[in-house]
Image (cartoon, rainbow, N blue to C red):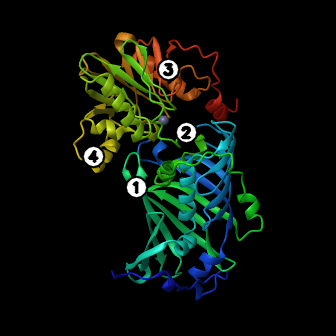
C-alpha cells in the first residue's frame, strides 16, 4: 500500500471503458466539471429498505417503499429541489407525494398522502442536511470535483487493485474507491451517527456509467449501512445544466424562519436514518427532546407520550422503563426528568418489547445508566452484539422465554412472549396489581387506526397465556383502553384488505 497526497489540479486521470457511451482514455477534468456544471437533473426509480425494521432481528431488511424521484441540484450554490412520488409498502400501504425546495439553510416541504397527511410549510433543517449529504454521496464525480482531496492510496493488486481517495467536504471524511479498470468510482463511503451502533458506515456502490455532456454519471446505485441494504436506485435520465433548473430551484424564502445549523448538522450526520424513514412522514426528523412529559395513567404507572410512547412502572425499590424511543437525546432528557422525580430510585430494568429501532433507538443512555435489559431470548444475541461493540461497561441481559416475573422493584412485573408476524421476539409487559398490559405496535389504545393482524396476534397471546387484562397501554396511541377491546370505532382493514382483497 502506498500513500501520498496530491492536489486537486493533478487529479486528472485516465479511464478506459469498453462500452460506447464513455470513450476509452477520456480524461475527467474535475476542475472543468466544478466550474461548468452549475446544476444537474436526475430522474430515477428507487426502492427503500429498512434493515432495523426486519421481522427477525438482524435478518432480511424490510422493503418500505418504492418511488419516482426527480432531483435538481446546484452543488456549488447549495440549492436543491427534490420530489418523491412514493408507493408506501410498510408499515402502511398507500401513496405519498413529497417535494422539497431549499437552499443551504432553509426550504419548503409540500406533502400529501401517507401517515402524516397534508403539509405545506418550512422544511426541517435536519432534512436539509440529510438531503445534501445524500446528493454528494450519490454523485461521486461531483463529490470528487468539489471536495478537498487529502490522500490517495492503493489497495489490492491485479484485477482487485483499487485506488482509494480520501476526501473532505463539510467537515466530513469521504472515501472513494476508484475501480482500476474503468478509472471510475466503484464506491463512496462515509461514517455516520447511528442510534444503536454509535457510528456506522454509509456506502453506495455504483454501476452502469454513462457519459452526459462529458460528465460520467452512474445510472445504478445500491446503498448499504453496515451490511444492510437501504436503497436501490435506477436512473432513467440525467441532464447537465438543464434549462428548467432555475424555475425548479426557485422558492420564496422571505417568510421562512432562519434554519437551525445544529439540526442541519444532526440530519447531515445521520442521513441514513432520516432518509430511510422518509416514507413514514417526518416523525424521525427531530430528537424529540422538547416534548418529554411523565403522565400517570394508573397508580404508579406512567406513560411518556410521543410519536412512540414509553411506560414507567414505579415500585418501592426502583423503576422499570418499557422501550426507549428514538433517539439517545430523548432518553437523556427522560433520564434527567426521572432522576428529578425519583432521586432515590434506580432504573432497575429496561424492558425492550422488540428490536425495531423506533422503539429502541434511545436504549444506550438507559443501559449506560445501569439498567438491566429485558428482552426476548429470540433477539438477545442481537442486542448482546450491539452492547459488546458499543458499551464500555458489561450489560446484564435478562432473557425472556414464554414468561418471566421480575421482582427487583418490590412490585411484580410479568413479561410475556407474544407470537406475531410484526416481529419475532415480541414481548409485552404486565403489571398484575393493576391488570395493565403494555404492548408496542400491535394495539394502539384510543387511536382509530389499527393493524388488524397484529391486533389479533396480541389478543391471541392474551388468551394463550391466560392473562387477566383489564387495561391496555401502548407504544402508540394514548392513555388507557379497557379490555375486552371495543373495536367498533376502529379502522382496522389495512393489512387484512391487502391480504384478502376484502
Ligand atoms: Zn415495530
State the SS at label 1: strand
Give the numbered dot on residue 283.
2
The residue at which mark 3 appears reads as 459
**Does residue 331 lie above or below 315 as drawn?**
below
State the SS at label 3: helix
State the SS at label 2: loop
Q: Residues within 10 Å of mark 2 (few under 14, many from 20)?
A: some
The residue at which mark 4 appears reads as 391
User: Is residue 412 left or right of 325 when viewed as pictured?
Assistant: left
The residue at which mark 1 appears reads as 200
Residue 54 visible? no
The alpha-carbon separation of the residues under discs 4 and 2 comes to 27 Å
From the image, which quarter does the C terminus lie in? top right
Mark before the other along the chain sequence, 4 or 2: 2
Mark 3: C-beta under 8 Å from nearest atom of ligand 1: no
Please state the horizontal and vertical placement of residue 155, each as a whole percent of the image.
37, 77
Q: Residues within 10 Å of mark 1 (few under 14, many from 20)?
A: some
Mark before the other along the chain sequence, 2 or 3: 2
User: Is residue 211 left or right of 386 when viewed as pictured?
Assistant: right
Mark 3 or 1, which is nearer the eye?
1
The alpha-carbon separation of the residues under discs 2 and 3 comes to 28 Å
Please state the horizontal and vertical placement of residue 239, each as a whole percent of the image.
71, 70
- Residue at left offset 61%, top offset 51%: 106
Amino acid at each position: 500500500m502506498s500513500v501520498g497526497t496530491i492536489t486537486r489540479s493533478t487529479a486528472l486521470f485516465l479511464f478506459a471503458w469498453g462500452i460506447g457511451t464513455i470513450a476509452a482514455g477520456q480524461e475527467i477534468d474535475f476542475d472543468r466539471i466544478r466550474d461548468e456544471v452549475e446544476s444537474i437533473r436526475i430522474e430515477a426509480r428507487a426502492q427503500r429498505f429498512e434493515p432495523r425494521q426486519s421481522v427477525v432481528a438482524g435478518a432480511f431488511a424490510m422493503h418500505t417503499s418504492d418511488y419516482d424521484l426527480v432531483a435538481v441540484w446546484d452543488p456549488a450554490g447549495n440549492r436543491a429541489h427534490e420530489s418523491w412520488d412514493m408507493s408506501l409498502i410498510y408499515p402502511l400501504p398507500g401513496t405519498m407525494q413529497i417535494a422539497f425546495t431549499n437552499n443551504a439553510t432553509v426550504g419548503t416541504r409540500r406533502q400529501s398522502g401517507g401517515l402524516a397527511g397534508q403539509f405545506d410549510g418550512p422544511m426541517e433543517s435536519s432534512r436539509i442536511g440529510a438531503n445534501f449529504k445524500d446528493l454528494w454521496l450519490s454523485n461521486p464525480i461531483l463529490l470528487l470535483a468539489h471536495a478537498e482531496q487529502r490522500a490517495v492510496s492503493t489497495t489490492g493488486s491485479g484485477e482487485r487493485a483499487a485506488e482509494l481517495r480520501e476526501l473532505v467536504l463539510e467537515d466530513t471524511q469521504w472515501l472513494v474507491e476508484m475501480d482500476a479498470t474503468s478509472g471510475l468510482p466503484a464506491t463512496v463511503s462515509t461514517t455516520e451517527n447511528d442510534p444503536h451502533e454509535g457510528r456506522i458506515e454509509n456506502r453506495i456502490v455504483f454501476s452502469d456509467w454513462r457519459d452526459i455532456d462529458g460528465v460520467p454519471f452512474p445510472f445504478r446505485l445500491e446503498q448499504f449501512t453496515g451490511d444492510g441494504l437501504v436503497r436501490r436506485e435506477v436512473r432513467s435520465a440525467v441532464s447537465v445544466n438543464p434549462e428548467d433548473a432555475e424555475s425548479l430551484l426557485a422558492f420564496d424564502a422571505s417568510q421562512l424562519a432562519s434554519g437551525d445549523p445544529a439540526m442541519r448538522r444532526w440530519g447531515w450526520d445521520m442521513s441514513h436514518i432520516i432518509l430511510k424513514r422518509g416514507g413514514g412522514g417526518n416523525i424521525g426528523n427531530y430528537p424529540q427532546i422538547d416534548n418529554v412529559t411523565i403522565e400517570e395513567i394508573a397508580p404508579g404507572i406512567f406513560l411518556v407520550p410521543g410519536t412512540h410512547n414509553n411506560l414507567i412502572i414505579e415500585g418501592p425499590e426502583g423503576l422499570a422503563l418499557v422501550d426507549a424511543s428514538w433517539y439517545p437525546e430523548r432518553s437523556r432528557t427522560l433520564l434527567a426528568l426521572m432522576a428529578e422525580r425519583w432521586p432515590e430510585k434506580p432504573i432497575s430494568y429496561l424492558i425492550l418489547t422488540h428490536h425495531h429501532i423506533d422503539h429502541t433507538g434511545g436504549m444506550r443512555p438507559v443501559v449506560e445508566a445501569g439498567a438491566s435489559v429485558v428482552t426476548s431470548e429470540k433477539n438477545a444475541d442481537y442486542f448482546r452484539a450491539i452492547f459488546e461493540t458499543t458499551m464500555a461497561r458489561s450489560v446484564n441481559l435478562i432473557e425472556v422465554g414464554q414468561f418471566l416475573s421480575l421482582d427487583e422493584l418490590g412490585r411484580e412485573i410479568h413479561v410475556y412472549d407474544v407470537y406475531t408476524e410484526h416481529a419475532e421476539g415480541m414481548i409485552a409487559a404486565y403489571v398484575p396489581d393493576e391488570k395493565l398490559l403494555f404492548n408496542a405496535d400491535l394495539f394502539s389504545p384510543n387511536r382509530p387506526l389499527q393493524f388488524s393482524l397484529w391486533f389479533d396476534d396480541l389478543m391471541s397471546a392474551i388468551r394463550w397465556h391466560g392473562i387477566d387484562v383489564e387495561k391496555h397501554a401502548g407504544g402508540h396511541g394514548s392513555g388507557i383502553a379497557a379490555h375486552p377491546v371495543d373495536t367498533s370505532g376502529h379502522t382496522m382493514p389495512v393489512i387484512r384488505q391487502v391480504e384478502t382483497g376484502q
